[in-house]
Image: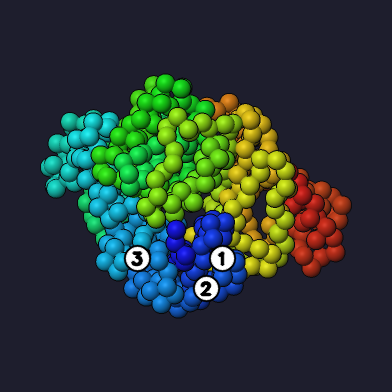
Amino acid sequence: MFKKVLIANRGEIAVRIIRACREMGIRPVAVFSDVDRTALHVRLAEEALPLGGSHPSETYLNIDKIIALARSSGAEAIHPGYGFLAENARFVERCEKEGIVFVGPPSRPMELMGQKTTSRQVMSKAGVPIIPGTLEPVQSEKDLRDSAERIGYPLLLKASGGGGGKGLRLVRQAGELESNFRLARSEADSSFGDPSIYVEKYIEDPHHIEVQILADHHGRTVYLGERECSLQRRYQKVLEETPSPFLDEKTRRFMGRTAVKAAASIGYRNAGTVEFIVDSRRNFYFLEMNARLQVEHPITEMVTGIDLVKKQFEIAAGMPLGLEQKDIRPQGHALECRIYAEDPDNDFLPSPGRIIHLHTPAGGLGIREDSGIYEGYNVPFEYDPLLAKLIAWGKTREEAVQRMRRALSEYRIYGIKTTVPFFQRILSHPQFLAGLYSTHFIGNLEKGPAKENNEEKLAAVLAAGLKSYFAIHKTDSPPTAAKTGGWKLQGRLQNLADRL
């Protein structure tokens, strides 16, 4: 096993990896940008080295700096976490060249899965079902029109070189095709440096379900169950659960075996996730493969009892998996809420700043928190606003949901806005409680009762309040903060408005 590992990441995932290292007797080496000098992962690591600078491109995305620090520290391996360099095949190649172990898959499988059209070609040849669409990027607007006519509407235009909703356009009719194609190409080029776009059939009311796999260097690959990831905002996951309330046992097993086939077809090693789109009839199609640890990996750990980060280290060190498929027996149900520094009442705008008070629901059976924050910490605006992940386990889905609701009610973060109230709203929604939701659930939830109705109610409250003020003060002038009683009236009106 390794004696020293450099962690090329920050925040809660760096803390998570540090803790796994300590339990395995590995010395963790943290790296940090200028704005992360006082971050929790820096405080916890036995050794922490500065990257210099603040922007991601000059810090956590800088391959030369990361490699240089790994060599100077004597680290035998690099764990990339997720994001940043975790799926950068060029970085993996550099590690291989430098004789540093990359805790993840080899560069070739990562390269194959990094291009969406290439991965679709590979999976199609391996007999893995893929969504109907083009296997090559479209080359011209004529090619685009011909492909669209063959596939049929509605369809998706998707960036070949990336994901996360960038370079993605839904086209419901022919008149929208060419303008959306130009927009998708432009966004793909600016986001990934690659304007290539391919066409894919749009699945109505889909589920986004992923299967966790582990593969060692001795020819063994297993799947560890699935995760329901359909609760998304703008194509970004916010809440995940396992097992999926939508799948039946037959589909679950078939999907797991298909994920193993997909990983084996490209010589995959280490932890990875095969993602599927599932239609209303439970037909599933390969979407992509994430060649890394996932943000939502803790819920799989909670139901299987398997530490995925430790398994990553063991596989990277050449050890056999030590598991057969019959050994994987998930128990109970688990959910994860991603706690972001965002304002859910203001279109989820980032909410950086100082945490002046923090109380987390760390106690109680079945509750886990993976966090990168502490009281007094300044949340920077330079990076992803993910603060922590709250995980709840129960013997049943109902018990897990109740525990999560209780834990969220105890969560206190003052000084910044967070998504805690947003999750409280989701977890009380009848549709979620019944497990009857697709990837459109949050979009429909945000539409809400229409905003206009709330504005009308607020206008009525304000009008009534002003009428009362005029009657009491025998005036037709609106109240101001300078007038006696103005603040009181404003406070009363605000209290009424807050109750809408």
Asked whether the beta carbons under mark 2 and mark 1 sit within 8 Å of each other, the answer is yes
Residue 467 lies, with reference to residue 231, above or below; the image says: below
Q: Across the whole image, how many numbered discs are drawn on residues?
A: 3
Give residue 245's position: percent from left, percent from top. 52, 28
User: Callout 3: helix, strand or loop?
Assistant: loop
State the quadrant of the N terminus: bottom left
Closest to the observer, 369 or 321: 321
Closest to the observer, 339 or 223: 223
Residue at point 85%, 55% (across, down): 474
Q: How many neighbours does mark 3 have within 10 angstroms: few (below 14), some (14-19), or many (20 or more)?
A: many
Q: How many neighbours does mark 1 have within 10 angstroms: few (below 14), some (14-19), or many (20 or more)?
A: many
Cα separation, mark 3 vs mark 2, equals 19 Å
Closest to the observer, 467 or 230: 230
Position of 363 compared to 196: left or right? right
Q: Which residue is mark 3?
A: 100
Tell which circle, 3 or 2, labels the residue nearer the N-terminal end: 2
Q: Which residue is mark 2?
A: 48
Q: Which residue is mark 1?
A: 41
Give residue 74's position: percent from left, percent from top. 42, 73
Residue 489 lies, with reference to residue 121, above or below; the image says: below
